[in-house]
Image (spheres, helix red, strand yellow):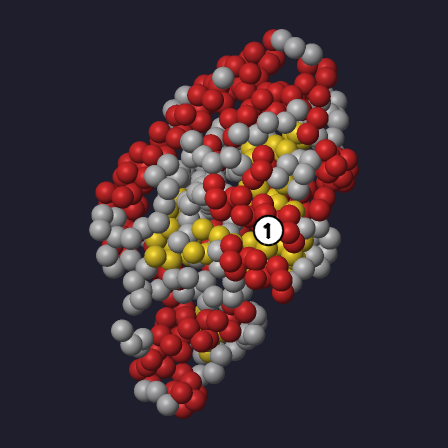
Amino acid sequence: MTMPRYKTIADQVAENIRSGRLRPGTQLPTVRTLMSEHGIALATAARVYRTLESMGLVVGEMGRGTFVRDTSLPRDLGLQTASEAGIIDLTFNNPAVPGQAELLRQALRSLASSGDLDALLRNAPHGGRAHEREIAAIHLRNRGIRVPGSQVLIVNGAQQGLALAMMAILKPGDVLAVDALTYPGIKALAVAHRIELLPIPLADGKTNLDALAASCKRRPVRAFYAMPTLHNPLGSIMPAADRKRLVALAEEHDFALIEDGAYAFLAEPAPKPLFMLAPNRTIYVSGLSKSVASGLRIGFIAAPVSLIPALEQAVRASTWSSPSITVELGCRWIEEGVVDDLEELKRKDAANRQRLARRIFGGINLVAHPNAYFLWLPLPEDMRAESIAAALRRDNILVTTAEPFSAASHAPNALRVALGSVPVETLELALRKVRVACGY
């Protein structure tokens, strides 16, 4: 299928905006100038700018012209608009099941009437108290991690865990290899810590290890960031054979592994984690944000003995310690089996939402794990992700384009749809509107 001329030109301008060659505030040529430069009809030139405007990349000002918009704010992830009344947020997962608020109420009452409350008013050691770290180590056994509490740190959510991992093993200018489609949070951390991201192509939704091997011969890769158990946004599971080969590559080229297990609780059983295959060069990061509640901000790091001092120092330099009250609450819930129960309930909830999505998108090639709280929706060639996202936003529905997840220069034409933050009835209505907007 031949791409219409206006779409080709719009793609070129869009790429110049995304790459920074056209900065925010830059005035674009007039419609007639664009017509002359490309040898196209006036109506075609006007359609180029309408397309760019529908993508949210430019804005037309009456009597002044067309200007590049500031796209630096994370609007594609809904982080600025999710709290607006009437908005259906399909960009972020904050999964909850009935009864969680009452569980919290009961736990706070129990906490208030027992225990050493005075201790909760004081700073904890960097990475948590010894008994808390032992409890966290017990929880990590659910993910196949077998370590003593001395090799576990408690931090303020998995995002901080990833930041601490970077601080412990990378320095500005180092090369961190990532999948070409990866977690947006790792991109933000790379910018903050001045780490160079090296995108590795994917094959069938999984890391192309041949491409990684070739990249290691060309560049001094210092670490590789992986989501082997339930990749975000693709929902893939790295096969056991690929995990062994990845570890072999890490040994051969002497790079570290940062293993993100944020969504791993949704995929059981799963192959052995990278940490257990390469315990001396892997930092494993997970937390309770998705399996329990994001507001608790409890994360866990399992790391080699040699890296524990550096990680504790990184905790000290950033937040000193995690809030004692939330850590105590989380540890109680681990010991009482509440976390295990919630994880089981959320696996069932996620599977139910996936079945709903597959029913609505029947006959469409969506990409997702059957237990994931998100799906990846490739789009027809004649549809544009940015335009669809903008149209849905006008209908008060937020979805994410591929751009925030793309570590490469060109993002695929697809949407990532989160399923875990709205009631099922609302989700069904929203997904039907997404299908219509995508032209299916």
Along the line of sight, the residue nearer the viewer: 321 or 70: 321
Residue 256 horizontal/vertical position (percent): 65, 47
Q: Residue at x 49, y 79 (%)?
A: 28
Asked whether residue 372 is in view, the answer is yes
Q: Residue at x 35, y 64 (%)?
A: 384
Residue 370 appears left or right of 62:
left
Q: Quadrant of residue 386?
A: bottom left
Q: Within 10 Å of the Cα at label 1, are there few (<14), some (14-19), or many (20+) other Cα atoms?
A: some
Q: Quadrant of residue 323?
A: top right
Q: Residue most toward the top?
A: 114
Residue under circle 1?
A: 249
Asked whether residue 156 is in view, the answer is no
Q: Is residue 265 above or below residue 377?
A: above
Along the line of sight, the residue nearer the viewer: 142 or 10: 142
Q: Residue at x 47, y 83 (%)?
A: 29
SS at badge 1: helix
Along the line of sight, the residue nearer the viewer: 296 or 410: 410
Q: Residue at x 52, y 14 (%)?
A: 336
Residue 426 horizontal/vertical position (percent): 31, 39
Residue 55 horizontal/vertical position (percent): 41, 65
Indicate the quadrant containing the C terminus: top left, top right, bottom left or bottom right: bottom left
Residue 51 horizontal/vertical position (percent): 37, 71
- Image mark count: 1
Indicate the quadrant containing the N terminus: top left, top right, bottom left or bottom right: bottom left
Amino acid tagged 1 = Leu
